Amino acid sequence: MRLGDKLILVSSAIVIAVLGCGGFLAMRAYEDFQVRLAKGQALQHADVIAKSVRYHMLKNRRDDVQWIIETVGRREGLFDIRVFNDKGAVAYASRRQDIGGREDIASERCAYCHAPGARLAPETTTLDAARLVTSGAGSRQIAVMAPIRNEPACHGCHPARRKVLGSLEVIQTVDELARQIAANRRRSLVLLVVLVVLVAAAQGLLTLHEVTLPVGRLHAGFDRVAAGDLASRVDAAGSGELAALSRAFNCLTGQLQEAKARLDHWTDELSAQVARATGELRESNRRLEAASRLKSDFVRDVSHELRAPLGSIASCLHAVLGGYAADERTRQELLERACRKTEALTQMVRDLLDLARLGESGQPCSRESVDLAALLGRAGELFQAKAAERGVRLELELAPGVPPVDADPRDLEMLVTNLLDNAIKYNRRGGRATAALGVRDGAVRLTVADTGIGIAREDMPRLFNEFFRSEAARKHEKEGTGLGLSIVKKLVDRQGGSLSVHSEAGVGTRFEISFAARVA
């Protein structure tokens, strides 16, 4: 059962009890008042009758006394009028058949005066002289017993020692009064029921508005909060305790909503951090796996590249030492071949060492001002002989006023050497190799171009891989390590420059490298 229903039941029970008790007491007071009023009327009748018959009794006019009693006894509401003599016999009566009869002294009518310890003949002016009695038929009546006292005017017939000569009894029915009281009880009961219903309805409406509805709203609000709706609010209008409780509920849900928002923000941040850390770990793992694969591939490629020249050297030496060379010239050719292979192996080892040095992240890079034009001029002089031997025209185009660059001179020399060597090595006889140096967009730009075999489009993605040599390169030049361009790429990256390649198979290749000019 809900709290509002309990309050309505309790308050209604209290109202019913209070109104019931009040109604009961009011009806009892009303009934007592009506009874006292009826007793007063009966006393008035007795007093009027006593005064009316006194004169005739003094004159001993018995017929007149009887006529008066019969006439008055016919009035509505009067049941019986009797006059008793001092012997207890009925001397006069409104019903003649009662004359001469006697009343049992032990009856309810006589017990009030003649019971042991009872006081005799109360004054008729007091309500004690009127009393409610029950007739033989069971109806309720008001009986008034008024004494007829001996007066001086009566002493002629009655001795003075006799104080009471008889008594007057007036019996008045209360049937009409009982009907009025019963009707009044019914009306009071109906009124009480209507009043109880009205008060209970008013109490119910008040409880509904002040208790049931606010508690219901709070209960619904708690249900919504329990379901996760922290934005839920309840109506907090009013100034009572439940309104204050509603405001406290709204404040609590607001604080919970803010706390949840902060928690969600922290959760999102933590999730983002975990995602970033997971991504970094995944990327590190991918790099480790890639490095592991590169290491395996590198070892495999190095082993493959070393095996062929070593096998060729061993074959030449075995042929010479085994006496398979028929003459001196054959032995000389075998030894020269072994010497060339040895030089190729030496160059490969040198390139591998350079590549390993460039791959060390902690390897320091000394930077200083380098005159790239002078360096390129010296390199051009060194490669002129090789270019002439292969029938290639080597040209240098040095723009005036090229500023120096901040770089490692050893790295720049290795870079220029590899590019010029490739431009001559993979060129055709009668071709041209050009090395140009100038300034464009505030950067020093080195361009090395040739009119050689070029690079196929499908080979471009693998151009800077270690040991990569295209099929055209292998056919054109058998000797080579496939490490030169890989070293070039690492050198450019190490010096903070940029590298681009433009090539077309059968037409030629152009390498463009840019370095930031040294700030004076």
Image (cartoon, helix red, strand yellow):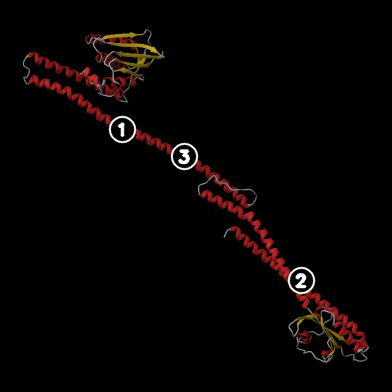
Q: Tell us which disc is closer to us: 2 or 3.
A: 2
Disc on the earlier residue, 2 or 3: 2
**The C terminus: image quadrant:** top left
Which label belongs to residue 288?
A: 1
**Rendered location of residue 113, percent (x, y):** 79, 85
In the depicted view, which residue is nearer to us: 507 or 119? 507
Distance from Cα at disc 2 to Cα at disc 3? 80 Å
Label 3 SS: helix
Which label belongs to residue 10?
A: none
Above or below, comparing residue 401 to residue 181 in the picture = above
Residue identified by numbered label 3: 266
Label 2 SS: helix
User: Which corner quadrant of the image does residue 462 belong to?
Assistant: top left
Distance from Cα at disc 3 to Cα at disc 1? 32 Å
**Rendered location of residue 215, percent (x, y):** 59, 53
Q: How many numbered callouts? A: 3
Contact (Cβ within 8 Å) of mark 3 with mark 1: no
Above or below, comparing residue 39 to residue 111 in the picture = above
What residue type is disc 1 on? Leu
What residue type is disc 3 on? Trp
**Rendered location of residue 497, percent (x, y):** 36, 19
In the depicted view, which residue is nearer to us: 294 or 66? 66
Label 1 SS: helix
State the residue at coordinates (32%, 34%).
285
Q: Local crowd at mark 3 within 10 Å, few (<14), some, or many (≥20)?
A: few
Residue identified by numbered label 2: 30
Residue 58 located left or right of residue 187: right
Residue 72 located left or right of residue 517: right
In the depicted view, which residue is nearer to us: 255 or 136? 136
Above or below, comparing residue 123 to residue 433 in the picture = below
User: Residue reaching furthest front?
Assistant: 506
What residue type is disc 2 on? Tyr
